[in-house]
Image: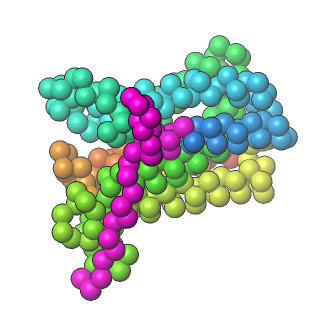
Amino acid sequence: MLTALAFPAIDPVLFEFGPITVRWYALAYVAGLLLGWWYLRSLARRPPATAMTERQADDLLLWVTFGVLLGGRVGYVLIYNPAFYLDHPMEILAVWRGGMSFHGGLAGVLLAIGLYCWRHGLSFLAVGDLVACATPIGLFLGRIANFINGELYGRATDLPWGFIFPNGGPKARHPSQLYEALLEGALLFLLLYALVRYADALKKPGLVGGAFLGGYAVLRFGVEYVRQPDSQIGLIGPGLTMGQTLSLPLFFAGLALFLWAWRKRPV
């Protein structure tokens, strides 16, 4: 290794005011939800997006927030570290220390959307498409917060942009959090935007949602090859990480939904 980048000295705590502590990690979730809500409202105003009104988009924000937080935390506890939390149940509430699962959050959001649509007589697929368009915004900010926290770093590398993370030992490592921010966040956002803007994808409910699920699964699967596997889990089966294992069914579900919606007549 010829060069390595020193990890930037960014305090995970943004500021403290008496007993109140505001962390970059929490701010990323708040900003992701608010910016996603703003984008969702803009989509609801633009034809052919007639899935919901702006007022309904406002109401949906609360449902999605609970889905993200509860689903993400419960998913992490049950999938990534059940033994630890079984011995330390009070740590389940310590969300400020990190520990959120995308796949768990996705399940929570889908449940929240389903319940909201059932209650208000809306199309689950059409509303899901709008939420899918906004989701990469939160993914981008969340991965940036992971980088600031110095967590979920990558495997050792000799590449010149490798970072020496505070908890990653003396070796330079891939900044896999930044890879995910650019791919699962920025790139996926642009791909979905292009589908909506240039292919009128919202006219076929389920098309954007399928593209999001399949696209995320492919990008996450690829990045996992340079991301350090979870120490408490390691590799599974034929050398796959837990993230890759969970992304496989997600890919096939997204592909099936995309192809099914593609064959439907435009609404």
Residue placed most toward the observer, 245 or 144: 144
The residue sitting at 48% across, 36% down in the picture is: 106
The residue sitting at 27% across, 86% down in the picture is: 2
The residue sitting at 50% across, 41% down in the picture is: 27
In the rendered image, the quadrant that contains the C terminus is top right
The residue sitting at 18% across, 69% down in the picture is: 170
Judge from the rendering whether residue 242 lies leftward or rightward of residue 63; answer left or right.
Answer: left
In the rendered image, the quadrant that contains the N terminus is bottom left
Residue stretch rendered in magenta on the structure: 1-30
Judge from the rendering whether residue 213 lies leftward or rightward of residue 258; answer left or right.
Answer: left
Residue 5 placement (x, y as % from top left)? 34, 74
Q: How many marks?
A: 0
Q: Residue lying furthest bottom in this view?
A: 2
Judge from the rendering whether residue 94 lies leftward or rightward of residue 31; answer left or right.
Answer: left
Using the image, determine if residue 195 lies above or below residue 19: below
Q: Is residue 94 visible?
A: yes
Q: Is residue 99 visible?
A: no
Q: Residue lying furthest left in this view?
A: 87
Q: Residue lying furthest front in this view?
A: 18
Place residue 48 in its image quadrant.
top right
Place residue 4 in its image quadrant.
bottom left
